[in-house]
Image (cartoon, rainbow, N blue to C red):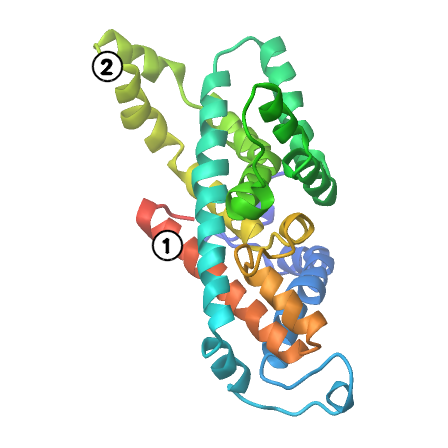
Amino acid sequence: MNATNYVTKEGRLKRPQALRSIVFLLPSWLLLLLFFVGPILLTVFFSFTNLALTGTQAQNIDFVGFQNFAAMFDDANFRISVLKTIVFLFLSAIIGQQVLGFLLALLMKGRKQSFRRIIGIIIIAGWVTPEIVVAFCWVAFLNDSGTLNMILNAIGLSAVTWLYTFPMISVCIANIWHGTAFSMMVFQASLDDVPTELEEAARIDGASKIKVLTKIVLPIVKGTIVTNMILVTLQTLGVFTLIYTMTGGGPGTSTQTLPIFMYNQAFVNYQLGYGTAISLVLLVIGIIASLFYIRSMKVQI
């Protein structure tokens, strides 16, 4: 059937087909409104209230304006949590998952399919493992009597209290191990689409591997880099189970990222309104980081 029966000269859908498209898309829109837009709007509303988990404030909600935000920015623990969140994001997402995932994908480019399949299965095994299981595995590996200290003792070195002496490095390594496979798969698919003719032509002209990478490969996959960076950033900003299981946000506040701080305020101190205000700040940080990536890489998304 001719496609012109469904579109106008301006390229728009005719009214019956447009209405039919709206009907077909309506369930998706309703699901988005219910499970995406709705929770965001509720978060915004509750962040301006004194909602509590127990007591009279749990039944009688009062609008307190910007009181939660004023208390938040005046709280030293909140400022510490923001700093820890940025450190965790930079080390485990930007430096760790993004760079390591790209290097793994680059090393697997052009390899035999059997080799790629074996390495892919090994790396993806860490990604599909539930976060709580990953946390317990790394606690068993890094605790005082764990596997790593047993190896150090076997070669004559002193044991290290990794989760107490290097808590942030420990949770970053665990998160990198857990999430790098996702970046590797994204970059692997993108690198496979880079025309081999361009790379071969550049090598014939005398370009080094570094020149081929920086002048040909990276500009072609720039959009994928930004998209993956946004996805990994949003995922890392929401990491809670891994950190809470390994360190509980400690020792002290050394690994207290914003999700840990938000949980403590909402479910330990029972201040749900204050907790939702923190979650709103976390959402804003994710949006700002995403816009920064897009602007810095000059990518149209």
Q: Locate residue 195: give its quadrant.
A: top left
Q: Is residue 287 visible?
A: no
Element type at mark 1: helix
Q: Is residue 246 above or below residue 256?
A: above
Residue at 68% across, 83% down? 51
Residue highlighted by disc 1? 292
Q: Locate residue 280: give its quadrant.
A: bottom right
Q: Position of residue 97 (x, y in %)?
A: 50, 37
Q: Nearer the viewer, residue 110 or 96?
A: 96
Of the residues shown, which amino acid type is indicated by label 1?
A: Phe
Of the residues shown, which amino acid type is indicated by label 2?
A: Ala
Q: Is residue 187 above or below residue 120?
A: below
Q: Which mark is residue 207?
A: 2
Q: Position of residue 20 (x, y in %)?
A: 69, 57
**Quadrant location of the N terminus?**
top right
Q: Is residue 10 above or below residue 223?
A: below
Q: Is residue 138 visible?
A: yes
